[in-house]
Image (cartoon, rainbow, N blue to C red):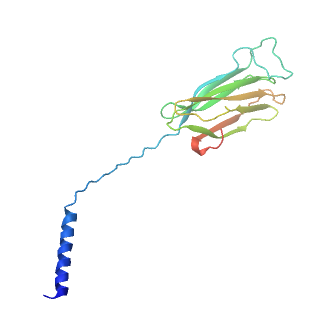
Amino acid sequence: MNRSRMFSLVSLALLLASIGAVAAMWTSTLRVNVAVQTGDVSVAWVKWSCSDKGPDPQIPGSKYSNTEGKNVASCIITPEVTDSHGNVLKLNVTIHNAYPGYHVVVYMTVKNIGTIPVKLYTSSLTGGSPGAVTAQLIKPADTQIDAGNTSQYQLVINVEDGATQNSTYTFQLTLVFAQWNEVSGP
């Protein structure tokens, strides 16, 4: 037999032996099933009230006073828009029979009814009539609300000297909340 043929036969035998060893090797396989369920960003108004609970409050530090304890103006808050679960998404504030010097604070509590912490992303106060009726939003120092928790906002409304009799002044407050890691700052 030829040497090269002998070498080929030995090589072929070694190759077949190594294939047999590999086929006889024991194996174990690990697998992972992954399911990612996303959370929910959702807020609602849960409590609201006005500071006018008796004699009409007057603009602090102004020329106005109500030493007589008159109670002629009123502040009424009613739910205006709810979602399919009955959560209040929009409030309607009506101030009736107001006059220059009348001052009211609307207290509004926001609840995080979702599963992800939220922060106030933007707020806007539009409308009104400078010199007649002014409004100012007072926000908490930290606007983050964890799931299930609440935060209080205040809307300070003053009826100024420029208000005219038998007039209606309107404005709208909008608060937009986003997931906490999308909003920078407190």
| Camera sees residue 179 | no
The residue furthest right is 63
Place residue 43 in its image quadrant.
top right
Q: Is residue 24 above or below residue 100?
A: below
The residue that appears at 16% across and 83% down in the rendered structure is: 6
76 is higher (above) or lower (below) than 81: above
In the rendered view of the protein, which quadrant contains the N terminus? bottom left
**Residue drawn 18% across the image and 66% down it:** 20
Considering depth in this image, is 113 or 179 the residue closer to the camera? 179
Q: Is residue 156 left or right of residue 84?
A: right
- Find residue 165 and report its horizontal and vertical position in percent: 80, 26
Residue 40 shown left or right of residue 107 in the figure: left
> Which residue is located at x 26 percent, y 54 percent?
28
- For the residue pair 170 and 87, the one nearer the viewer reads as 87
Q: Quadrant of the C terminus?
A: top right
Relative to the observer, which residue lies in front, 159 or 181?
Answer: 181
Residue 161, image x and y in percent?
84, 28
Q: Residue 79 location in percent, x, y?
A: 58, 28
Extreme bottom residue here? 2
